Amino acid sequence: MMTQVGFLPDETSSFVGRRAELARLDTALATRRMTTLIGPGGVGKTRLAVRAARAAADRYPDGAWWADLSPLYDDALLLPTVSDAVGLADHTLRMPVEALCEWLSDKRLLLVLDSAEHLRGPCSHLLAELITTSPGLTVLVTSRQPLATRGEHVVRIQPLPVDGAPDALRLFEDRLRAADPHADLEAPGDRAAAADICRRLEGIPLAIELAAAGIGRHTVAQLATRIGTRFDAPVDAEDLTASRLDLLADDSLWPRRHRTLRTTIGWSHELCTPLERLLWARLTVLRTDFDEETAREVCTGGPLTPDAVDRALQGLVAQSVVQWDGTRYRMLDTLREYGRMWLTELGEERAAADRHARSFLGLARRAHDGWTGPDQISWYHRISDTHLDLCAALDHLLAHDVTAAQEMAGRVGFFWACCGHLSEARGYAQRALEAGPVEGTHRTRLQWVLGVAALLQGDFATAEKYGALCTATALYDRDDDGMLGATYLSGLTQLMTGEPAAALEAAERVLRMTEPGRTEGEPGSSGEGVSGASGEPGGSGESAHRLRCRLITVFALTALGRLTESLPAATALRRSCERGGEYWTRSYADYQLALIALLQGRPEDSAAHARDMLAGKHRLRDSFGIALGLDILAAAIAAQGAGARAARVYGTGHAYWRMVGHPQRGTPELGAVRENCELQARAAVGDEAYQRAFERGQADNAEVGLAAALQSGLQP
């Protein structure tokens, strides 16, 4: 069996029945390019799609990938969400849809888009382009309605059968035992009462799960009676609950007689305490999975104290309104819809959005302050994982609190640049600058983010422009850390455009000029003993900008061939980063140590440093850094005479360069290193063997290829 690649959500509860539906889906995925699984909310489309995709995943060499569209309130982040889902971190200035089409054009993979009903038009247009340009792509969509895309094959999903089949009753019993391992249906009349509940709920899985969660407050018989009473009662057209619940149904797909889920959600809502209902409503402002701390920050206010939020959250988990996977909480989109409706009814939409924005501004501040500290990796991942919430917060702040938006866009921008969200980093920074006057460090940060994003996209003219603006702004504001950041941006631009001497001169001058306790003109040092500028705390005592500015000196010295100077400078920089737990700059110091060792004729040392770099960049999910590291590792392996092994690693590097959308890039001296790598590898094994190994590396899934490259030894 092939190594499974891709990402599919974990199944955290038992899967019941659906054998016929799974067989139909399996056939559809094997014979159709696009299949849409349709059905009403709560019928189990997502669970069925996960199970079908997992069963079919081994048929796709490039994996099965999942994109949850339910958190998207409009189509603004549709393309970034789908690109993230398939592993594309485009660093170019191309149109995002063009980059995505090119990335998928030669891949054989399964893409699942979950909960597409509210984006039917945009999804249909996007999939029409992707299917046309990507012959190896298979798409599975879940939606309440078809997308009306050409070639779409529709599979309708019905509720679980309740007569003559045990599936609905088994689901009820499974969920009952999940809440209480000692619960059963062995008491007289319990099994018959449970079967009656399932019939009343028409076999709709979500309705059955919500009912089973109510057993903690009732016996099975009492629950059956209560549900029967509620369902037999006539519906009052003026009743607020009924009329609001009607919003959850599309009458063209879900006939009005199918009020079951709507009624069950309303019944579950009534079972909640007043504070649980309020928390249910307030939680709907969150776009992504969340923890207790976030729930408290976003939902505390009025009668909901922080302790009350904790108690109410556990109550919602007990009633299956909120799901807990052991580390994070989430709410199903159907239940989120209902809660959002009540948030509007309570008149709390603006207040909830304000709290949400304040919470994620606080997250951006803490992450920014922790960049050079021992928790850098966890902050990096948290910023990446909460991307949709951060975008929503920024959109709200740009409309209602421009100063806060300007601060937030500047603080989160470098994280986004490292995560590969260059378009969002650049776009939000530009919008923040244009939204109103901005002074001081916020202005410098925004200009810096714009310049870094432009540089990583290959737009050197814009990067140079913002490097100069950052320098002028920092000088005017007497901002030492701003000067260091500006010098990093300008110096990296100069390195990428072949001017290492200018980069070195400016970096050394600014490091001396900003050294604490010295005035301009006094001797200083860019070595290990340099203390940090204030403004960004870090465990090494140096700000992130100072560490990056030191990195420029290392790059420049190496580019100028001054290896006896760059080696101790790189070693000292790595130690400074290691003391503080800083991985991003440290990984590039490892990269320089690998390059220096290679140029000095120490290929074994070079390979070891390259693998250290790759391990760090992998932890940071930095695809651009991984691409650079694989190139230098391939060259080190080739220098040891292992031509086929080098060719495979080199091929994997090409796969990562494609992932960021650029041909091979880096400082100019790498051109000669790459050429020499290929010549040495071909000489060692011959052109035919080299080409086979290179193509194998290119064809490998990127994660699989990286894992192989990280293995030490020179075996093929």
Image (spheres, helix red, strand yellow):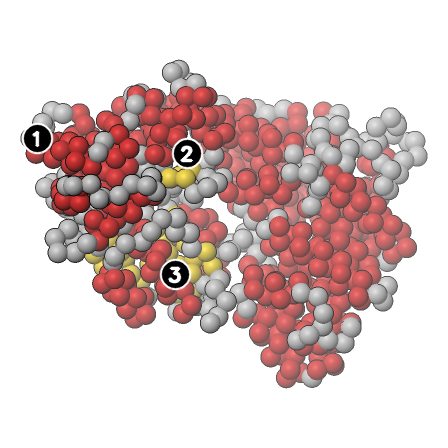
Q: Residues within 10 Å of mark 2 (few under 14, many from 20)?
A: many
Instruction: Give the total number of marks visible in the rendering.
Output: 3
Q: Amino acid at mark 1?
A: Ala
Q: State the image coordinates of residue 531 (x, y, percent, origin top left).
A: 83, 33
Cα separation, mark 2 vs mark 1, equals 35 Å
Cα separation, mark 2 vs mark 3, equals 28 Å
Q: Amino acid at mark 2?
A: Leu
Residue closest to the eye, 377 or 102 = 377
Residue closest to the eye, 670 or 237 = 237
Mark 2 and mark 3 residues within 8 Å of each other at the beta carbon: no
Reading the image, the residue beneath label 1 is: 233
Q: Which quadrant holds the C terminus?
A: bottom right
641 lies left or right of 172:
right
Q: Quadrant of residue 659?
A: bottom right
Q: Residues within 10 Å of mark 1 (few under 14, many from 20)?
A: few
Q: Looking at the image, is 610 positioned above or below residue 312?
A: below
Residue located at (59% from left, 51% from top): 621
Which secondary structure, mark 2?
A: loop
Q: Residues within 10 Å of mark 3 (few under 14, many from 20)?
A: some
333 lies left or right of 564:
left
Reading the image, the residue beneath label 3 is: 54
Cα separation, mark 3 vs mark 1, equals 42 Å
Reading the image, the residue beneath label 2 is: 286
Residue located at (74% from left, 55% from top): 591
Dot placed on the residue nearer the N-terminal end, 3 or 1 = 3
Q: Quadrant of residue 382?
A: top right
Q: State the image coordinates of residue 617 (x, y, percent, origin top left).
A: 65, 52
